[in-house]
Amino acid sequence: EAGVVQSPRYKIIEKKQPVAFWCNPISGHNTLYWYRQNLGQGPELLIRYENEEAVDDSQLPKDRFSAERLKGVDSTLKIQPAELGDSAVYLCASSLRAGVSYNEQFFGPGTRLTVL
Amino acid sequence: GENVEQHPSTLSVQEGDSAVIKCTYSDSASNYFPWYKQELGKRPQLIIDIRSNVGEKKDQRIAVTLNKTAKHFSLHITETQPEDSAVYFCAAKSPRPGNTPLVFGKGTRLSVIA
């Protein structure tokens, strides 16, 4: 079974440029998460989807970040315009259904973003 | 919302010794506590988890203990090996509506010295 797939793995851009990350969750997983992981820190949730609905986006900086999961499967996270402080690893994760208490989250390999 | 504190931030042990990482959480309703291992440049992977209805769980050289009264849980690794070197994250999940499903600690960088 394929795991969570993310692309690209690495991205280097100049500040003020736009950037997009793509994630394909494990087949059958209804819940999809986008996390940001700064160097030396734990993952911090940006947004959580239940199918195509964003049910928790309280940590998403909505002035420059946006996300979509139109068909309830793969998802795209966008930053426009990027700032120096956005440099981090962006992790996607999926689980069967967040409403069930003990669902393991499976992480993708992440996209390492460097903003120059 | 939930807040998870993790200590220590770095830990060095000799091969064969034990390592202990401790976490505290703030929401007494939290009921699920996973531990993730993240090797350099790789994704976090679940290594063990514990639910609030048990106090201890073991899986070979890894064990986790939970003290609900004190709101803390710990990861114990015995007979450490160089391949145990990684960053370990604890996390806590609260079932309260509207809460972030999983809140992570800041991580512990474990170095096992051969």
Image: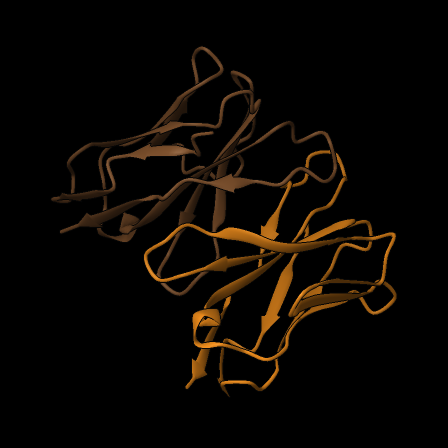
Chain colours: A brown, B orange
Q: How many numbered marks appear? A: 0
Residue at 24 percent across and 46 percent down: it is A113
Instruction: Residue A32 in the image: state x and y as whole percent.
Output: 51, 29
Residue at 50 percent across and 22 percent down: it is A27
Give the camera-side residue of A113 and B46: B46
Give the camera-side residue of A69 and B33: B33
Asked if residue A64 can be seen in this view, the reply is no
Instruction: Residue B3 in the image: state x and y as whole percent.
Output: 65, 58
B25 is higher (above) or lower (below) than A9: below
Give the camera-side residue of B31 and A6: A6
Residue at 57 percent across and 40 percent down: it is A105
Picture quadrant of residue B100: top right
Taking A91 as reference, is A13 left or right? left
Instruction: Residue B86 in the image: state x and y as whole percent.
Output: 44, 68
B101 is higher (above) or lower (below) than B59: above
Instruction: Name the outermost residue toward the top.
Output: A71
Taking B56 as reference, is B44 left or right? left
Instruction: Residue A59 in the image: state x and y as whole percent.
Output: 50, 41
Taking B19 as reference, is A93 left or right? left
Asked if residue A11 can be seen in this view, the reply is yes
Residue at 55 percent across and 20 percent down: it is A28
